[in-house]
Image (cartoon, grey):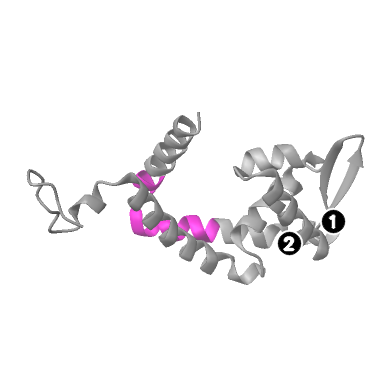
Amino acid sequence: MTQPMNQKPEKDEAFLQDCLYFTTNRLSRAITRMADEAFATTGLAPAYGYLIRLVIGSPGITQKELSEKLSITPSTLTRFVDKLENKQLVERKVHGKTVMVYPTEKGIELGPTLRQASKRLKQNYEEILGKELSDQLTEYLTSSSKQLEK
């Protein structure tokens, strides 16, 4: 494929550093590796750990609320809850058309381990980035995500 006559070919990869898509995916891969390491002791992927923490904190939370809080689609949340139900960590109760999720005793017992994994993850990235930058980055990403999701 040829370049138009008036357009210079890009000779380096500097454009990647100016691309929000590329840089956020790079950040996502790095933080995912760190989260996987921090949650390894729980036997669960980080997303499952955060889901259980939400359920422990709000027993009877609806699946709709969970999908909104975790920013995942309802179908993805259903798969997550199915897996955690199979591990006997949560249970669903249907009230009319509303599906509510409750922690099991086994799920509640895992709570302190999950909180410790979350704490370890935060300590690890704060050690690298510093607390101030970590807090700012979290705030910027939360705000940016909300704006882009509109």
Q: Main structural element of the magenta stretch: helix, strand or loop?
A: helix
Q: Residue at x 86, y 49 (%)?
A: 92
Q: Which residue is mark 2?
A: 110
Q: Badge 1, how many Cα within 10 Å: few under 14, some, many 20+?
A: some
Q: Position of residue 75 (x, y in %)?
A: 70, 48
Q: Position of residue 5 (x, y in %)?
A: 7, 47
Q: Nearer the viewer, residue 138 or 74?
A: 74
Q: Residue at x 33, y 51 (%)?
A: 23
Queried whether the magenta region covers residue 125, the answer comes back as yes
The disc, 2 or 1, on the residue closer to the chain's N-terminal end is: 1
Q: Position of residue 127 (x, y in %)?
A: 38, 59
Name the amino acid type tagged 2. Leu
Above or below, comparing residue 40 to residue 100 in the picture? below
In space, the residues marked 2 and 1 are separated at their CA atoms by 10 Å
Q: Which residues are magenta?
A: 119-134
Tell me, yes or no, if residue 130 can be seen here.
no
Q: Nearer the viewer, residue 62 or 97?
A: 97
- Quadrant, the N terminus: bottom left
Tell me, yes or no, if residue 147 can be seen here.
yes
Q: Badge 2, how many Cα within 10 Å: few under 14, some, many 20+?
A: some
Name the amino acid type tagged 1. Thr
* 124 displayed left or right of 2: right
Q: Position of residue 105 (x, y in %)?
A: 85, 58
Which structural element holds mark 1? loop
Which structural element holds mark 2? helix
Query: Residue 104 bears which disc, if any?
Result: 1
In the displayed image of the protein, which residue is found farthest to the front?
1
Q: Nearer the viewer, residue 93 or 22?
A: 22
* 86 displayed left or right of 37: right
Query: Residue 132 bears which disc, if any?
Result: none
Q: Quadrant of residue 42?
A: bottom right
Q: Residue at x 43, y 37 (%)?
A: 139
